[in-house]
Amino acid sequence: MTSLNKPFDRGFASALATPRRLNTQRMALLTIIATLALLFFIPLVWLVISSLKSDGEVTVYPLQILPRVPRWDNYIQAVTVVDYWGAMLRSVLLATGYATLTVVSSAFVGFGFARHRAPGRNFLFFVVVSMLILPHLVVVLPQFVLYSRYGLANSYLPWVLWGMTGAPIHIFLFRQFFAAFPRELEDAAEIDGCGRLRIFWQIFLPNAITPMLAVFIFSFNWVWGDFLTQALFLAPDQTTLAMLLAAAYRNPQGLPLYSLTMAGAVVYILPLIIVFLIAQRYFMEAIVTTGLKG
Amino acid sequence: MLRIIAFPNWQSRSAREARWFYVFVAPWLVGFIFLTVIPLAFGLYLSLTNYNGVNINDLKFVGMANYERAFSDSNVLNSIQRTLYYTLISVPTGIAVSLLIAFWMTLDIPFKGLFRVIFYIPYIIPLVATTWIWKLLFEKNFGLVNGVVSAFSPGTALGWLIDYPTETLTLLVLWLGTGGGMIIFIAGLQGIPKDLLEAARVDGTNPWQQFSKITLPLLTPVLLFQLLLGFIRALQIMIEPMLLSPSANGTLGVAVPAANRFFMVTAYREMFSFNRFGYGSALIWLMFGTSVLLALGILWSSRWWVFYDDNRIFPTD
């Protein structure tokens, strides 16, 4: 895999490098990129600024950029006026549970595709890859109708089922990863009398920590940020953070309390950003594998 | 004995391997059948009935009536128009912007790591938070965007969320989606052999020629996949416009104003706001059929514009 941190030093850069024009050209380009990056960054800055305003300051006309005094108290209110910690606990449990299950099941299935020949294998792999572009909603909405018929809605069970059966994109990722392992590794283990399950569990899985980590983070983020399926499948007393953030902070007239919502949102997204900054490399490499190879 | 006669190779290595294959893929296969195929089939069955959420025991079979109704329902026709408009502006801009930024990120410029992180972070922010940010930015009276525009043209109060909902939505999707596309394009660009570009440079080509004659053709397999995903995602857009609606709250479907009713929003409302599950299922199946046809069409067209080395999306083995 190409490392993303390797500078792309020769190709395009050297093509641009008619020496005299280099500096002005690079400065112009840098300015354009920096401006665009600033535009991409402003919404996040605005989120944080708004979380420190009073609600009057958020909605005042004409626009007031900064709060007179930053109201850190908003953060305390945001996590106390609603059952924030309860919702967070449910989000953590749901996301961790789903991510753990899907890491193991996707690796299991990916190993099957990568290391076994069988009639029907290519067809089934074609189905897995096709599922990558199947519209998610088209399946989820009828699933909900069906699940509610059989009493599976209003529970965490759907996430258990989804987790146990693996996700096509992660099956694909593990398949690509395991397919690159040397054959000798398996042969040696088989001669030693190692069964297939033990080969998977004791040889392949321990050597797949990086993709497992990436898949775990992906899956965790998906559940953490996913609003629709939680709003559909969970009961009102199972409110998660995504559901809470969508509707909870309102004044008695039912109008949104912007500053509290923003403070709640900052606490909601901060863990994701921290984990992303720490695990950046694995994260991006995994995306590259799923998005490109095949 | 019987087993050996019926399956002469039952004990052979290849048969054993095949059996293990099915053991390993079983979790996915069972899930695929019960969590995908059966719900889809159930939806197809419902789409031929008058199911309204309670009459499951005396369903009436209505044939193709739900499908016929869709093509004379002005709500549906309007939502199709909106969805197509959104798809046609958002998919090309999304791909162009992420490709352009990815290209920049492969150039030799300072602070590249920082820029990459900034462009990527919106991609990991949950939608519920993103839509709140967007509401604050584009609010008519106290939004930042109108505030900034007012500095140049005082008193500007464009109702972005109400009068230009599709454009505002496109900007939101651009903001949150660019990072994902960018990473994939960066990897694609880095996979292009440098000696090829070096040779072209020695031959006296200009950067644009190198891009259009070498980089772009070699990037077409990546473009194909991005195009497929982009179209499918855009056509089934639903939750973003719902959450962007001014009064979105716990009861999602009811509050969505007409301008934000894209095709899947309409289907959702038919099912969950009006309990017309039969009709809603028909709309979902129309979306499913359209997506499959579109995907096949794009794949079929790829033979004329995608340059294949060994980077096939569907490996032929």
Image: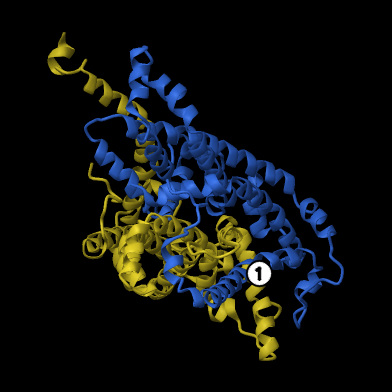
Chain colours: A blue, B yellow
Q: Is residue B230 left or right of residue A123?
A: right
Tell me if residue B258 can be seen.
no
Please, is residue B156 above or below residue A192 in the view?
Answer: below
Please, is residue A264 above or below residue A192 in the view?
Answer: below
Q: Is residue A291 left or right of residue B304?
A: right
Q: Chain of mark 1?
A: A
Q: Position of residue B12 (x, y in %)?
A: 20, 17
How many dots with numbers?
1
Q: Residue at x 12, y 14 (%)?
A: B5
Q: Is residue B214 left or right of residue B248?
A: left
Q: Residue at x 82, y 68 (%)?
A: A54
Give the camera-side residue of A68 and B220: B220
Q: Quadrant of the C terminus of chain B?
A: top left
Tell me the SS state at disc 1: helix
Q: Quadrant of the N terminus of chain B?
A: top left
The image quarter in which residue A115 lies:
top left
Q: Position of residue B238 (x, y in %)?
A: 48, 63
Q: Residues within 10 Å of mark 1 (few under 14, many from 20)?
A: few
Please, is residue B55 above or below residue A210 in the view?
Answer: below
Please, is residue A245 above or below residue B210 in the view?
Answer: above
Q: Amino acid at mark 1?
A: Ile
Residue marked by disc 1: A42
Q: Position of residue B31 (x, y in %)?
A: 39, 37
The image quarter in which residue B288 lies:
bottom left
Tell me if residue A22 can be seen.
yes
Q: Residue furthest right?
A: A69
Q: Residue furthest front?
A: A19
